[in-house]
Image (tube, rainbow, N blue to C red):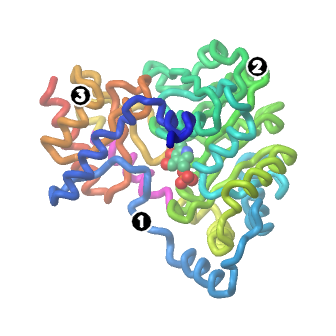
């Protein structure tokens, strides 16, 4: 039997760009130690009090089918967080709880696009984006951002692809670049969405990790609340990646449709996870700042290391747990550089090319290991780049 074309073509037929990652994992499996700066996951685990609340809830019986849109307390807590952080009045009816941000991305595209609709996304991009759009039966349309603009998208580049499209997916603070979109960038994006009647799907899972300036949700811009679906998650802000708890924020009628989608797909998020998420959100912004602190610290360390050499340039990094390094001065592609670094120094970083063509000649470094080891690995990386020039 043949599987559907939709699922066979989910990855678009090309290489998935994860060769370096797979090689590093194979080295580790064969007993060779590798310093891994690849995966976007904290080096701490979910805090014990959150797990205790999860346990309490489960023992108290919250192990049956849970409310599909999310329990009222969690929808209210998410709505309150969004209202406070963005200034846009947000109520329970605007919130759908999903199994993580990834599932929210899929659901948002199902809500915004009919089969075959053009769905725009920006390159470089979070690795799952094109497959998610294909999975939702949309036609992914890539719009390149430029290294010379520090990967801030240009409104005119988006507008050039917008005719007849249904949606635009953006991500700020950005994975893989660490760039936070400026107010000017977001105003330009909002204008294109209004002019071309696009849904804006705004992936804000890194909204608690901003090192410079502030995170602006485009949903707060004039005329945007009615056409924006915000994707959020407990994964990054609360170190709860494995709990699979995220959300879509949007107009109440669309959230109603997403509840129907949930009924026919995920059937909701386990009640004990939702109760733990309510507890975690109740810890307030101070707790989120604590979770983000190691990345803030390591970014400062990296700025110091990079300022002391000339071979590797740092893309202005204002947020998220990543740095994007420009290694074009070595004349190597990001992929060749990353493979050579892995072979010679047993340090694994992601080639920019894993996230699209716009970041060719770059590397994504995840700041997800302990400070001293992180600083040491960066020094080695810079010395290696210098040795190639
Ligand atoms: N969006 C971006 C930009 C991400 O980097 C990630 C995870 O790395 C996700 C969404 C999905 O996160 P989760 O499904 O764990 O909420």
Alpha carbon distance from label 2 to label 3:
42 Å
Tell us which disc is closer to us: 1 or 3: 1
Tell me where residue 136 appears, x and y as whole percent. Answer: 64, 38
Determine whether 166 is above or below 92 in the image: above
Q: Which mark is residue 44?
A: 1
In the picture of the structure, the residue carrying the numbered disc 2 is: 196
Residue farthest bottom in this picture? 60
Q: Is mark 1 within 8 Å of ligand 1?
A: no
Mark 1–mark 3 distance (CA, rounded to whole Å): 32 Å
- Classify 52 as above or below 152: below
- Percent from the top left, x then y, of residue 16? 39, 36
Q: Which mark is residue 257?
A: none
Residue depth check, mark 2 versus mark 3: number of the one nearer the observer: 2
Would residue 95 appear left or right of 365 to someone viewing this image? right
Q: How many marks?
A: 3
Residue occupying image coordinates x 54% and y 77%: 51
Tell me the residue at 77%/58% (across/down): 80
Q: Position of residue 198 (x, y in %)?
A: 74, 26
């Amino acid at each position: 039997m043949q599987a559907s074309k939709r699922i066979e073509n989910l990855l678009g037929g090309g290489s998935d760009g994860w060769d370096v990652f797979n090689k590093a994992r194979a080295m580790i499996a064969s007993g060779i130690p590798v310093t891994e700066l690849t995966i976007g996951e904290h080096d701490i685990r979910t805090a014990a009090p959150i797990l205790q609340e999860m346990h309490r809830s489960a023992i108290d019986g919250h192990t049956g089918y849970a409310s599909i849109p999310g329990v009222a307390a969690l929808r209210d807590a998410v709505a309150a967080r969004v209202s406070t952080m963005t200034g846009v009045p947000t109520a329970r009816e605007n919130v759908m709880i999903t199994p993580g941000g990834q599932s929210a991305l899929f659901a948002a595209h199902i809500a915004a696009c009919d089969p075959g609709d053009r769905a725009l996304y920006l390159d470089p991009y979070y690795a799952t984006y094109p497959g998610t759009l294909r999975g939702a039966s949309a036609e992914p349309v890539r719009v390149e951002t430029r290294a010379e603009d520090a990967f801030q998208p240009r409104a005119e580049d988006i507008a050039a692809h917008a005719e007849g499209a249904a949606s635009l997916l953006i991500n700020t603070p950005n994975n893989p670049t660490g760039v936070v979109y400026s107010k000017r960038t977001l105003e330009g994006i909002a204008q294109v969405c209004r002019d071309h009647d696009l849904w804006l799907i705004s992936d804000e899972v890194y909204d608690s990790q901003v090192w410079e300036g502030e995170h602006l949700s485009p949903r707060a811009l004039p005329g945007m609340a009615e056409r924006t679906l915000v994707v959020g998650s407990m994964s990054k802000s609360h170190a709860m990646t494995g709990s699979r708890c995220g959300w879509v924020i949007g107009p109440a009628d669309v959230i109603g449709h997403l509840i129907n989608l949930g009924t026919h797909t995920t059937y909701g998020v386990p009640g004990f996870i939702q109760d733990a998420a309510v507890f975690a959100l109740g810890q307030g912004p101070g707790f989120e700042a604590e979770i983000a602190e190691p990345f803030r610290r390591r970014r400062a360390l990296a700025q110091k290391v990079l300022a002391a050499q000339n071979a590797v340039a740092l893309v202005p990094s204002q947020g998220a747990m990543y740095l994007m390094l420009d290694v074009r001065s070595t004349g190597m592609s990001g992929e060749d550089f990353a493979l050579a670094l892995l072979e010679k120094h047993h340090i694994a970083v992601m080639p920019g090319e894993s996230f699209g063509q716009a970041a060719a000649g770059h590397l994504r470094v995840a700041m997800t290991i302990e400070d001293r080891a992180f600083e040491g690995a960066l020094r080695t990386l810079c010395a290696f780049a210098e040795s190639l020039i």
